[in-house]
Image (spheres, rainbow, N blue to C red):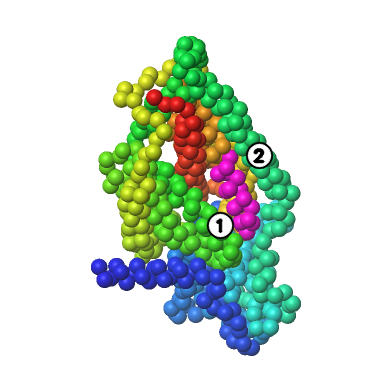
Amino acid sequence: MRLFNKVLGLLTLQALFCLASASEKNHKYGDNEAVVLWVNKVGPYNNPQETYNYYYLPFCKPFPDKKAEHSWGGLGEVLQGNELINSQLEINFKVPLNKKVICSQTLSTEHVSTFEQAVQRQYWYELFLDDLPIWGFVGEAKKDKNGQEAIYIYTHKAFDISYNKDKIIQVNLTSDDPVLLEDGAKLTFTYSVTWYPTSVPFARRFERYLDYSFFEHKIHWFSIFNSFMMVMFLTGLVAIILMRTLRKDYARYAKSDDDMESLERDLNEESGWKLVHGDVFRPPRNLVLLAACVGTGMQLALLSLAVILLTIAGNYFEERGTILTAFIVCYALTSFWGGYTSGGFYARNDGKHWIRAMLLTACLFPGVCFAIAFSLNTIAIFYHSLAAVPFGYIMAVILLWSFISFPLCLIGTVIGRNWNSVPNNPCRVKRIPSPIPDRAWYLHPWSICLAGGLLPFGSIFIEMYFIFTSFWGYKVYYVYGFMLLVVLILMIVTASVTIVGTYFLLNAENYHWQWTSFGMSSSTALYVFLYSIHYFLFKTKMSGLFQTCFYFGYMSMFCIGLSLMCGAVGYLGAAAFVRTIYRNVKCD
């Protein structure tokens, strides 16, 4: 037990330390001070997740007998598949270096075959110098005089480094000196270093990695404006329903006792939401599952807002794995809110098995993600990829969930069922459920659910393109202000659409609105997943079992989380609407 507590303490301190706005290093160098160049990974350019250790390719090493020095970062950095190894190249601050030999090697048949496949698949590699990423290609394929394809390997790396006073600002890499790849060829790898002074301040050194022309294109602004207009339209529609349609319903249902004959005639001739007042607050089926979904969804909504705000405040996109670390830590800390929401909801609906609800709330989303991640990790281990997470870090995540997330969910559930458990329903529930009349197909719950996700998806699908392109296309997503606005718009549109759909469902005398409202809003994720299939087929050049599994595995986790978040937001909006309209009518 003491060992677990020590490990947990170290993990928590490490996670919080990674979230600090200031780096552990001060990035300051004295003249002639050694600057470490780290090699990270290699992989095919079209498959972003299919990455391998840098020395997966048969590159020679400057000191092959010397033990490799690793730089292990935070939890998020390792989960993203990074393994930094000291390149052992001699680079000193402000000291120019002409062409210097790294190492030499004679290619065997196996080496030639490995390098040939790497060049044909457009293998790239990633290096880091002072936490600045550097990318380059292994080689190139060119046509010879006879029109045959010849494979060349770049043997020289030219580093152009810009500095401002005692800090490194920019690093450029030029790959040169291609050598024909053939059996028995001798490759001599070299490098050179050139230093240039610059006036660019240190605070702006990451700007060169940001694609302003892509993310701040007028289409991006137009999509935000279009989503905002959709919000105005839907909120106006909800206002019309509440102010005009419901006012007429209230006037019809609130007739005095002296006009009972007219009231009875109206109720026999017309149908409406008032007729199901004795069933509308009946506890839904599969109450434990719905409580867990609503609780987890609200936790994910709070988590999304928290991570976006933290990223805006701290520029976390500039550090390797920091956003993922923030996501994991914030998920653990927001488990209290998930348990509180789930426990209160379950108690208000007369649930008797609150421990089941609590366990399902704590395990639902992490369990699904762990099952998918375990499958992907098995594939990565089979391929010897860096995407395979070491066992120690898997245990770190499990311990973080066991000792922080789960206890907070338990505490939240206990507090929720004690402080937030009063039903306070405006209408009593009848003992015998009323029959649900047959209606047209478009008033069936499944039709309303499928239609409910279209407008919310329409408000975010352009932003989905930018997010997908940054995640799968080597672009740094930095416009988190846009993302915050889109998330808020998504929540408003989701709640508005769910309210309208719930009104139509109740008017059809169908009182099973709880699961319908959840499904109506969560169906947004279905359209996002369908769009991800379109993006995979027509916007990328991904290939192979490895990348395909990782693409759809990641997209499945994202869409499941999105469905829970949207479903919870939609349900709570519908619940507030239902309570409001039935509070203002006379109920027997």
Q: Amino acid at mark 1?
A: Ile
Q: Residues within 10 Å of mark 2 (few under 14, many from 20)?
A: some
Question: Residue beneath label 2, please?
Answer: 232
Q: Nearer the viewer, residue 482 or 462?
A: 482
In the picture of the structure, the residue carrying the numbered disc 1 is 308
Residue at figure coordinates x 25%, y 68% from the top left:
1
* Secondary structure type for disc 2: helix
Which residue is most to the bottom?
31
Q: Quadrant of the C terminus?
A: top left
Judged left or right of residue 197, residue 278 is left
N-terminal label among 2 and 1: 2
**Is residue 480 found inside the magenta-colored segment of the image?**
yes
Work out whether 81 lies above or below 515: below
- SS for dot 1: helix
Residue 564 in percent (x, y) is at 46, 43
Residue type (three-letter) at the residue carrying disc 2: Met
Picture coordinates of residue 22, whole percent (x, y): 55, 73
Q: Nearer the viewer, mark 2 or mark 1?
A: 2
Residue range highlighted in magenta: 477-493
Q: Left or right: 308 with respect to 160? A: left
Q: Residue furthest front?
A: 258
User: Residue at the location (60% across, 68% down)?
Assistant: 133
Looking at the image, is 64 positioned above or below residue 181?
A: below
Residue 226 appears in view: yes
Determine the residue located farthest toward the left in the rendered image: 1
Disc 1 crowd, CA 10 A, few/some/many (<14, 14-19, 20+): many
Closest to the observer, 500 or 149 = 500
Q: Is residue 413 magenta?
A: no
Residue at 61%, 27% in the rendered image: 244
Q: What secondary structure predominates along the stretch shown in magenta?
A: helix
Q: Is residue 185 visible?
A: no
Image-based side of 318 in relation to 213, left or right: left
